[in-house]
Amino acid sequence: MLEKLKDLGILSPRKAEDYKKAWYKFSRNPLSVAGLVIVIVVVALAILAPYVTPYPHHAEYYVDFANANQPPSLAHPFGTDQFGRDVLTRIIFGFRYSLMMAATVLAIVTPPGVILGLIAGYYRDRWIDTVIMRIADIFVAVPPLVLALSICAVLEPNIFNAMMAVSLMWWPWYTRLVYSMASSLRMEPFVQAAEIIGASKIHIMFKEILPNCLGAILTKVTLDAAWVIILGSALSFVGLGAQPPTPDLGTMLSDGAKYMPTIWWITVFPAIAIAVIVLGFNLLGDGIRDIYAAEAR
């Protein structure tokens, strides 16, 4: 694939060689490759859910009490729930909401968190550093789940408010990460050289310092995707996230918990689905970390 892009002039030879080296470092760890495969499969299932699920209409308002609480079978590999809906279908549709939660939250919090960290780290020992980092410390001092639960309890319970609640308390972690890296990089010779030749502050922060922080940022984004999915599922589990009949994994866990251990499949399979997603993102994050760690050495 890289060779075709290079032949078409879309990818420069130098970039193609860099990607080859990165893939070589990544592929040396079989667990990282397994994580990448898991993430790709989950994303593909989420996108193609209406076409790959056996009963796509079960993801909406649907009731079939005649087939309620059926154990796993050929017709329903993961069984049916208390309303007769296919659990496998709802899990695959549930991937959509979990991935949407992770993508939305990280897209909202990463840019401002990184920018604030760059500003505070570059202007260290000035008032702007104190203001930004003390505000970040206030948010970090409150446990994330407690803050998210408090916000969601005040607002109307739905998936949008759950995403906003998680976003509000997640940005300080990126600010602190980038701040620590920018604080050390600002004294490096290449930054001082850019200052000597008259480069602007924006150029130094975004062209000199930020590229050297990308490895840690990308690794954290991948690992945080797993944490956001867990937190979103926890909010739905207590009734403050996605509301029925939305096929959210946390909501499915909550609905099935009251039927344990007799009708175990309503709870066990959604729990396994969450564990698989989290495992995939964590293994992928480890592989990305290994790529940049090898470059640093």
Image (spheres, helix red, strand yellow):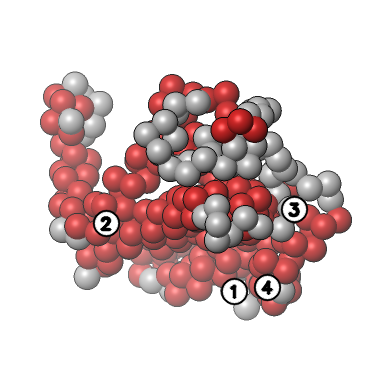
Choose between 206 and 61: the one closer to the eye. 61
The nearer-to-camera label among 4 and 1 is 4
- The residue wearing badge 1 is 124
Quadrant occupied by the C terminus: bottom left
Q: Check disc 3: other Cα within 10 Å, few if <14, some if 14-19, many if 20+.
A: many
Q: CA distance from mark 1 to mark 3?
A: 39 Å
In the figure, is residue 227 to the left or right of 21?
A: right
Query: Which label is found at residue 32?
Result: 2
Q: Which residue sits at x=72%, y=69%?
A: 146
Q: Which residue sits at x=58%, y=66%?
A: 173
Q: CA distance from mark 3 to mark 4?
A: 17 Å
Q: Secondary structure at mark 1?
A: loop
Q: Do residues under tags 1 and 3 come within 8 Å of each other at their CB atoms?
A: no
- The residue wearing badge 4 is 143
Q: Secondary structure at mark 4?
A: loop
Q: CA distance from mark 4 to mark 1?
A: 27 Å
Choose between 190 and 37: the one closer to the eye. 37
In the figure, is residue 210 to the left or right of 146?
A: left
